[in-house]
Amino acid sequence: MPKYSFSQSGEKFQLPEQEDYLKEFDRLQEVVEKQRALGREIVLVMGIGFVGAVMAAVVADAEDGKGNPNKFVIGMQRPSTRSYWKIPLLNRGISPINVEDPEVALIIDRCANVKKTLTATYTYEALKLADVVIVDVQCDYLKESLGNVRDGRADMEALEESLEIIASNINPKTLVLIETTVAPGTTEQIAYPIIKKMFRKRGIKSDPLLAHSFERVMPGKNYVSSIRDFWRVCSGVNEEATRKVVKFLKEVINTDKYPLTVLDRPIESETAKIVENSFRATILAFLDEWSLFAEQNGVDLIKVINAIKVRPTHSNMIFPGPGIGGYCLPKDGGLGLWAYRHIHGFEDDIFKITPLAIDINDTRALHVAQLTRDALRNMGRPIASAEILVLGASYREDVGDTRYSGSELIVRRLTEMGAEIRVHDPYVLHWWEFEKQDEYPATAHGLRRFFRGQEKLRDLCVEQDLKKALHGTDAIIFAVRHQPYLSLDPDEVVNNAGGPIAVIDCFGIINDVNIKRYFELGCEVKGLGRGHVKRIKDQVREEKEQMLLSAPIQSVKTQEGRRLEVKGLRKKSLKFVQK
Ligand SMILES: NC(=O)c1ccc[n+]([C@@H]2O[C@H](COP(=O)([O-])OP(=O)(O)OC[C@H]3O[C@@H](n4cnc5c(N)ncnc54)[C@H](O)[C@@H]3O)[C@@H](O)[C@H]2O)c1
């Protein structure tokens, strides 16, 4: 039976069969021969996911000093039902990833269709043709419990498998450049032995030419630029590998403007990546306790941070929002911890801050569910069966990447508490963490395991029409600082909702004027790190009381015909004062 792979838009592609492999290798050999005749180096990128697809295009777009392309790139992807579709799409010049940077689509189209310096394939034999192999496959960290990163392990399966396949196919002079974020020590202590052993089996005596240089790609509007025009760190396992990796990166990355840092050993390059991301995870986690302090003591942490940030030494303080997502920050520190024990063999426990930071970040979103519960309680509405709209599914503003977003945890916890959830996100069409929650991000490793009553979330659709999403809601949660949410008018929101609602601000999205307006409209407002909302609430209540006191006394007749003297402003909000 033929097998099929479906693209994100639903297009169906039949997986290759045995007889296709020979034909495909013939095709590649023919193209490569022509490209070599043009003096181009052949670069194979293994894994055409979020990083590999764009890195492949950046390399394919590289030119020599005279403006001639100097590389030919083969993007390689294993032909699994989950990922095969990326190959035919890339061959058509269509980006297999949806990102906000318009340059991604342009550069892929230009290289595949105009310059013809980019092709994609599924056959591992393509490795035989490569001068450089770039490894961009994933290396995950699988957590076994929520909020305890120590209870987990690095998932090296795809990486180890890729390295074995590479070693059994490449020419011994091929440079293998690992870009995957790995547990420090992987290049020298895992990759090198795998390749060396396979070389020995193949009767190759020379040392593998292996190097590491990590990616700093940032999802968002500058995706291509964050790969091409950004500082790189690299290191090789020996002098020749170092020389080759430096030469290669200088030819494809804008190293004139963004100088390359060459470190002595790959473990230093690998550690740089892990420390860089652990540092960021830590400064974010650090503010979690101050966020709670702020909520309990009438402090607006957003204003506090802005006041501190004017000091140049403290300018990188960041408000953490509802948890820290994205593919990298939640896992990279875990790879470090794991490496210390399982690659380097140490038994002691030297890591205090890194795991604590990840655990804090991984559970911060749960507090949002508490705030929502409390806001609804203050309005006399139970959370069970309340209709709650989550604004924003992605892990950061103005991108469509939902991996490990704080919003996912908010949805899961509120669902467990019985709430009915709807979601709006202008950048996300499908929230696969729910729609395919049994298999995404990996079978048996989604966050679903940590919550009960999650079955119905399979049907959670991301609404694109905000008005429709607001209709009849009891509470809204501002979870992501997406541009369209920054200017929402409270009157319109309440009007569209059909009455007063609970409003939860997770990211300092609502300014004080609008917080006040929500209170005036009868809403309840709460926010992460926003203790000052209570002050605004009191102010609104006092102003209402003042207005009532200064309002004229009116005489009204009750249904029973009694006459009452009342103080009031509008018929609807009359406060009866019996004299
Ligand atoms: N996404 C980011 O923002 C980002 C930023 C910096 C660094 N990184 C790092 O880059 C690496 C890759 O991340 P990603 O986001 O591109 O992951 P991804 O899951 O999007 O892509 C990995 C790809 O490799 C493919 N693959 C796996 N095994 C393979 C094999 N044997 N042969 C061929 N292909 C294979 C997968 O099918 C997938 O398409 C990770 O280590 C990640 O930590 C990612």
Image: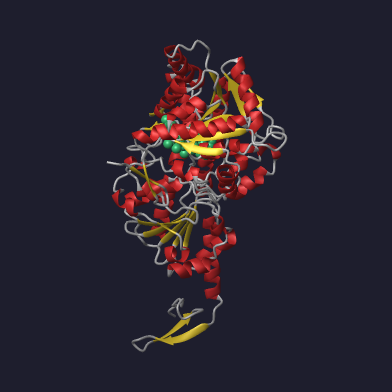
**Residue 183: x, y in percent?**
48, 25
Eyeballing the image, is 42 above or below 314? above
- The answer to which of 485 and 114 lies nearer the viewer is 114
- The answer to which of 487 and 83 lies nearer the viewer is 83
- Which quadrant of the rendered structure holds the N terminus? top left
Its colouring scheme is secondary structure
The extreme left residue here reads: 1
- Which quadrant of the rendered structure holds the C terminus? bottom left
Q: Is 210 positioned to the left or the right of 88 in the image?
A: right
**Residue 108: x, y in percent?**
56, 44
The answer, for residue 96, to whether it is visible in the render is: no
Eyeballing the image, is 286 above or below 173? below
Residue 56 falls in which quadrant of the image? Answer: top right
The answer, for residue 162, to whether it is visible in the render is: yes
The extreme bottom residue here reads: 561
Residue 550 falls in which quadrant of the image? Answer: bottom right
Q: Is 115 positioned to the left or the right of 362 in the image?
A: right
Residue 235 falls in which quadrant of the image? Answer: top right
- The answer to which of 98 and 155 lies nearer the viewer is 98
Q: How many marks?
A: 0
Eyeballing the image, is 551 above or below 514? below
**Residue 476: x, y in percent?**
45, 59
**Residue 52: x, y in percent?**
51, 36
